[in-house]
Amino acid sequence: MTEIKAVIGKYAEKYARFERDGGSVFQETWPRRHYQVIVCTFVLGVLPTKRARLDLLKKVAARLSAGGIVFLSVRGFGDVKTKARQGRKWRDGYITPVGTFIKPFRRTELTGFARGAGLVPHPNVGKWRSNSGIIDLVLVRQP
């Protein structure tokens, strides 16, 4: 896992437990090794530009081992709480009640975006539905 130092400090106990359970945390750098499983949850939607989102997915794809999978979760339109319930539009997303950026996705948009990074839906995993408006995908590198 790659994370910002300030976030690790804020949730030190949770990150320590994650590492005790066998996880790895990298601070703001990308390791050169490859992984069988990469989990990317609620990251794409907080990056303020399409370019940053695509760059992240390309880095994820580059670190994926042959046959490896990516679990990707983002907030959909039904899960985003925006300022004053109407939201303040900013770029292709919104400003949240706490003043942060969030970009909600639609499933087709997210799948197309992943394809641009060389990732496609896993052929043996059907579409997952969430009651909360969260979109989950299981991805593999394009053959």
Image: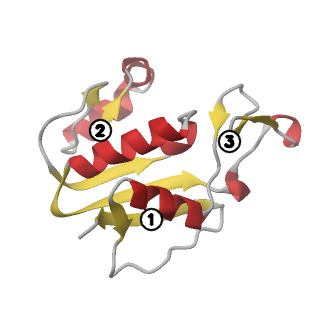
Give the foreground label among 1 and 2.
1
Secondary element under disc 1, as helix, strand or loop, is strand
| Coordinates of residue 24 in the picture (x, y in percent) | 21, 37
Contact between marks 3 and 1 (CB within 8 A): the answer is: no
Indicate which disc residue 100 carries. none
Identify the residue position indicated by label 3 in the image: 92
Quadrant position of the N terminus in the picture? top left
Instruction: Choose the circle earlier in sequence order: 3 or 2.
Output: 2
Amino acid type of the residue tagged 3 in the rendering: Asp
Identify the residue position indicated by label 1 in the image: 137
In the visual, does 61 lie left or right of 113? Answer: left
Q: Name the residue at 29% across, 65% down.
A: 140
Quadrant position of the C terminus in the picture? bottom left
Identify the residue position indicated by label 2 in the image: 1
Instruction: Choose the circle earlier in sequence order: 1 or 2.
Output: 2
Question: In 3D space, how far apart are the residues under numbered discs 1 and 2 (Cα atoms)?
Answer: 18 Å
Amino acid type of the residue tagged 1 in the rendering: Leu
Label 3 CA crowd tier, 10 Å (few <14, some 14–19, many 20+): few
Residue 116 in the image: above or below residue 13: below
Task: Specify the quadrant of the image occupied by residue 88.
Answer: top right
| Coordinates of residue 23 in the picture (x, y in percent) | 22, 42
Secondary element under disc 2, as helix, strand or loop, is loop
Amino acid type of the residue tagged 2 in the rendering: Met
Give the foreground label among 3 and 1.
3
**Closer to the camera in the image, 54 or 125:** 54
